[in-house]
Image: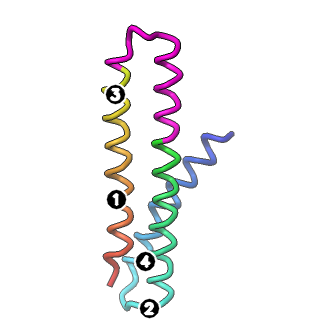
Amino acid sequence: MMTKLMKAFVLTALAAPALAVAADEPSSVGKGLAVIGGGLALIGGGLGIGLVGKGAVESIARQPEAAGKIQINMILAAALIEGATLFAVFAGFGAK
């Protein structure tokens, strides 16, 4: 249940800046949606990176000999999440 809720939250955070960019005329409502969308994207990215870190620490605790491989995959996943988050924030603030 919780993962479905988090997925919906992240998708909403990524969609709000796109809605603000789609507006033809810049308005305070569109700029407000962009700011809200950027904030939601940051919250979603933080939650995602936190869950990746939590899973990595739990995995390393279960199999310490696989720590190197787990850390590499964790860093790669965190970088991809961070990239998507920054793209959403820049898309929101890039609105006219």
Q: Earlier in the sequence, mark 2 or mark 3?
A: 2
Q: Amino acid under label 3?
A: Asn
Q: Earlier in the sequence, mark 2 or mark 4?
A: 4
Q: Is residue 55 above or below residue 43?
A: above
Q: Amino acid under label 1?
A: Leu
User: What is the C-alpha distance between the residues marked 3 and 1?
Assistant: 20 Å
How packed mark 3 is, by other alpha carbons closer than 10 Å (few <14, some 14-19, many 20 or more), is some
- Which residue is labeled 1 in the image? 86
Where residue 12 appears, as percent x and y from the top left, is 53, 60
For the residues labelled 4 and 3, say whether their Cβ atoms are less than 8 Å apart: no
What's the mark number on residue 20? 4
How packed mark 2 is, by other alpha carbons closer than 10 Å (few <14, some 14-19, many 20 or more), is few
Where residue 74 appears, as percent x and y from the top left, is 38, 31
- Which of the two discs, 2 and 3, sits closer to the camera? 3
Q: Is residue 43 above or below residue 68?
A: below
For the residues labelled 2 and 3, say whether their Cβ atoms are less than 8 Å apart: no
Residue at the image position 46 percent from the left and 10 percent from the top: 63
User: What is the C-alpha distance between the residues marked 2 and 1?
Assistant: 23 Å
- Which residue is labeled 3 in the image? 73
Where residue 51 appears, as percent x and y from the top left, is 52, 37
Helix or strand or loop: what does disc 1 sit on? helix
Helix or strand or loop: what does disc 4 sit on? helix
- Which residue is labeled 2 in the image? 27
The stretch of residues the image draws in magenta is 50-69
